[in-house]
Image: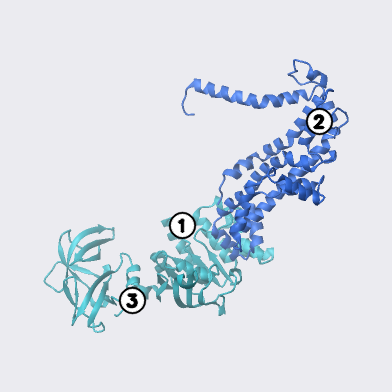
Chain colours: A blue, B cyan
Amino acid sequence: MVERRPLLSVLSHVVLLIGVLVVAFPVYLTFVASTHTAEAIVQAPMPLLPGDQFFHNYAAALTGSEHGQGSAAPVGRMMWISLVTALVIAFGKIAISLLSAFAIVYFRFPFKQLVFWSIFVTLMLPVEVRIFPTYQVVSDLGMLNTYAGLTIPLIASATATFLFRQFFMTVPDELVEAARMDGAGPMRFFKDVLVPLSATSIAALFVIQFIYGWNQYLWPLLVTTNENMYPVVIGIKRMISGGDSAQQWNLVMATAILAMLPPALVVMLMQKWFVKGLVDTEK
Amino acid sequence: MASISLRNVVKRYGLGPKANAVIHGVNAEIADGEFVVIVGPSGCGKSTLLRMVAGLEEITGGEIAIGGRVVNDVEPSERDIAMVFQNYALYPHMTVFENMAYGLKIAKVPMAEIQIRVDKAAKILELGTFLARKPRELSGGQRQRVAMGRAIVRQPSVFLFDEPLSNLDAKLRAQTRLEIQKLHNELHVTSLFVTHDQVEAMTLAERMIVMNAGRMEQIGTPDEVYHRPATTFVASFIGSPPMNLVRGHAEGAGFQAGGQLLPLPAAAPRAGELVLGVRPEHVELRTDLSAAGWPLRVQALEMLGAERLVYGLIGDALFTARLDATLPHPSVGDVVALHASPEHLHWFDAATTARIA
């Protein structure tokens, strides 16, 4: 705002502070709750300052040493599953979309229009819509409770393909011709020129797809029956089993905090690239 | 180093009866080491022709041979050519050194040899201090030099230039033009240079090909093209201000145009529609109206510093005269007598636009 009205300045700050509080306060409470004993949390009023059970709670959560009513799966294992799943999905989506966009933009082949529109149509088919047939296929192929079952059905991305397509279309034709004159074949051109130029787009997409892969709930819920193969988001749910006996809320909260960390880390680290990738046009 | 042969080269887009022919049979023989400029207005097919020589466009008909070898079906990288593009086409994420080395790297030239060649090219083009920079850190002129460097290191038989100066500002254009000339004098590589600017064509060419609407109107040295244009198009395209062209018809021993009767040269046909051409600088204006000359009614004057342009009408035909600025000049509205000596008159057939004398 260029206007110099102090009242508006104060007002905008107040609004922003309220926004921050609304978003951050529950997260803070979660963190506080994860550092107390279960009994301390349940008593009203709930403590607002961190307690002394930090190391104990987190160690217990990670190794699954305390048994409550819900699942006792070690969170460490579950975080590992989530990490592998998210990374495989992110890298897989990027690799497949790069190659698809490359084919669509730079090659002429029979039924090209049909292929293009088919990819477009899959935008209408997220996991939730195709869940029955996909489950059937995965189950028949014996891929339940495996990393493959968790990742392969989610690994193709129409959005990423279109993002790369749009980017490739901004690459000037002369660059392709210069590479051709230099003797670079299509894959050479792809590897030496297109991929380096797409670096910022790839980084931006990595962040988005990693978070998508990490937050997957419905699909892993169906595909995994073995506690050993739960991603952490499912682990959190399973810890709260309902019933009458006391919940280990402190462990649940600790797990929730642990589950939030990797995506936050990825966003923070890739922030610079993320914005650059969506905005920058480099010639 | 190699010669280039264009034999009846035709380019058509589309198939069957609806096909659109953009180049209608171009024939030219370019000698080894020659610098040939292809010049013409936008859309005349000059870039398409160059791209066919480069291998970036399919050749619909005819043959193109480089160094005696027919290259119609040969990949661009195997034709032993190098191209300099209008938009430089440098790889933005590579340094200047890597840009120049890329083609050699793909050809599996040993690193030591690459280093030698790049350094040599950098020395010729004065790029030594820029080798570690990326293209976005360079000015337009520097980028164009890098593009030329990239072409030089390949040590090709033929250089192809596709309007390389069009993206530069006027001063830089003049500078880079001189650099290209210097380069050619040093390396003597057969070069094909495409431009729409006739000044570039006249200054750089050892021979020029003037093209219009997909046809080659004339091929010759700048001197030939300027002093003996083969068609009215060439006559009006080359030279600034353009040649005055007056249409009229031959009647017996005279040429009837704009209300005047002018004697015809011996070689001209005695009948039919003719176009007379005379360059503005070959025209003399005299105040003495009684002598044989054409009456020019002066409409406007333009003072250019060293020269003065006089615009006027002869009858209803527009005429431009170029006079030395130090000479006495008419004023607007005056009627002066326009003279031109017979050897400066060009005669064209009005129907075929071809030169008669």
x then y, percent, for residue A123: 63, 47
* Label 3 environment density (alpha carbons within 10 Å; few <14, some 14–19, many ≥20): some
**Residue B167: mark in rendering:** 1
* Label 2 environment density (alpha carbons within 10 Å; few <14, some 14–19, many ≥20): many
The residue that label 2 is drawn on is: A239
Q: Foreground mark, 1 or 2?
A: 2
Quadrant including the N terminus of chain B: bottom right
The residue that label 3 is drawn on is: B228
x then y, percent, for residue A245: 84, 23
- Identify the amino acid type marked 2: Met
**Residue A192: mark in rendering:** none
Q: Which residue is drawn at 60% across and 43% down?
A: A276
Q: Can residue B181 be seen by looking at this rendering?
A: no
Of all chains, the one bearing label 1 is B
Q: Is there CB contact under 8 Å for labels 1 and 2?
A: no
- Identify the amino acid type marked 1: Asn
Q: Can residue A259 be seen by looking at this rendering?
A: yes
| Nearer to the camera, B189 or A98 | A98
Secondary element type, mark 1: loop
| Nearer to the camera, B258 or B284 | B258
Q: In which quarter of the image is residue B174?
A: bottom left
